Image (cartoon, grey):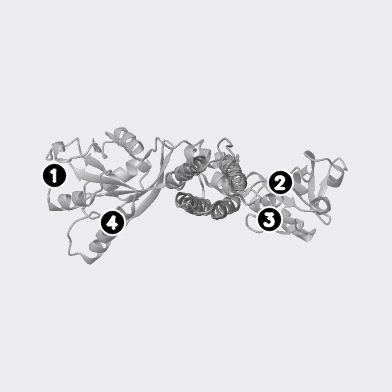
Amino acid sequence: MSARTIAAISTPPGEGGISVIRISGDDALSVADKCFRSFSGKSLSSLKGYSALYGEIVSGHDVVDDAVALVFRAPKSYTGEDTVELSVHGGKLVAQKVLRIAFDCGAVPADRGEFTKRAFLNGKIDLTRAESIIKVITAKNDIALKISQSAKNGRIAKEINTIIERLLELAASFSVYADYPDEEIENLDPDSFLASINDILKRFSDMTDNYDTGKKICDGIECVIVGKPNVGKSTLMNRLCKCDRSIVTDVAGTTRDVVDSTVVLDDITLILSDTAGIRKTADAVEKAGVDRSIDKLNASSLIIAVFDLSRPFDDDDRNILEMLPDNAIIVLNKSDLERAIDRSFFKTGNVVEISAKNDLGIERLTDLILKTVKCENLDVDDAILISERQLDCVKKATESLVEAKRAMENNVTLDAVGICIDDALGWLYELTGK
């Protein structure tokens, strides 16, 4: 694919048990032989694939570190090229020195994502699998990992390739029907064609519908805690984070800005935001915080609105209640104190009583959050798209198929319908990288 033999550190920076320096390309073995000396005296170039040698990294007469060198022969490697992985002790300085020595021996720095790019260009993986690698690495919860692993294992490619086969059969059927319109051939009639198109459109629709849900689960759901000052928002934030993330005092208006933290509840990741108390105020600084709180409320997918059970409902509470969407979670805090609010006032099923200060009811709140955000209809074994690029390709293919369907319903010639089918195929080939 390329005359360049590339090298890079494949493990995260920092201290650990080992660091791995990967070298890939036509000259990978000769580059590694120049800087690796085995204790057995064997050269890496003499090894078969999936073989290893123990030795040391050398620079001139200096020994830099002990190392294990693992050899992968083309095409049976991740990149499809000859590859050597040098495992050295996991210090940042050691890894950097070994990488620099590899450059001195003839390798060049790998571009970001170049190992995966070469795997794709060498036909080892398709484009959907290539895109899934970073998703596996950055998965924040179990569901995100399962969705990413499913894509890496070819679930998206399998679904798209199945649809491609059906569209190719459909295009061939159009040709047969156009050449032999008077022949009674089973399933070669306009009604069967439309049924096939409708079925494929339904599969496209399922993919696009699941995309937003899958994206929220993978990237994290924006969740904001709102309420008027001193109702216990910051205490609740700390309970959910299981650490003192927000400053808590008895002084109303302590929180003047949005405080963010990532929280994993069960298999759902929340990007949780504690906000300034929402109330009418003449203080310019506090008003700026209130405006940011309202903006955050309007932008978040999930809203937890906190009210103080021990204080009578007032205009600030009513103002907040009017801002809330129907799926907002109502938290009635300070349940350990004498109650001044009737729960029946809230006309929603998403109501829970807690005492954030005493850690009472937090488990019930957690269950309600999971029930509200969990998408029971999302099956992680389905072909769930994992990038905006994939989504755009499916949308464009859908537009082409809708045009094909419209053409058939308007009795346009099948040649024109076939052009629409070809357009849809083109977008699906782009999705998988073909």
- Image quadrant holding the N terminus, namely bottom right
- Give the Cα separation between the discs numbered 4 and 1: 22 Å
Which amino acid lies under the numbered mark 3 shown in the image of this protein?
A: Gln
Q: Amino acid at mark 1?
A: Arg
| Marks 2 and 4, the one that precedes in the sequence | 2
Q: Is residue 9 left or right of residue 383?
A: right
- Secondary structure state at the residue bearing disc 4: helix
Tell me the residue that label 3 is attached to. Answer: 96
Labels 4 and 3: the sequence-earlier one: 3
Q: Which residue position holds label 4?
A: 293
For the residues labelled 4 and 1, say whether their Cβ atoms are less than 8 Å apart: no
- Farthest residue, direction bottom: 284
Q: Which residue lies at the image location 57% right of the left edge and 35% below the top edge?
A: 186
Percent position of residue 191, x then y: 48, 41
Structural distance between the alpha carbons of marks 2 and 4 = 49 Å
Looking at the picture, tell me which residue is in the foreground, 97 or 125.
Answer: 125
Q: Is residue 21 left or right of residue 223?
A: right
- Label 2 or label 1, whichever lies nearer to me, is 1
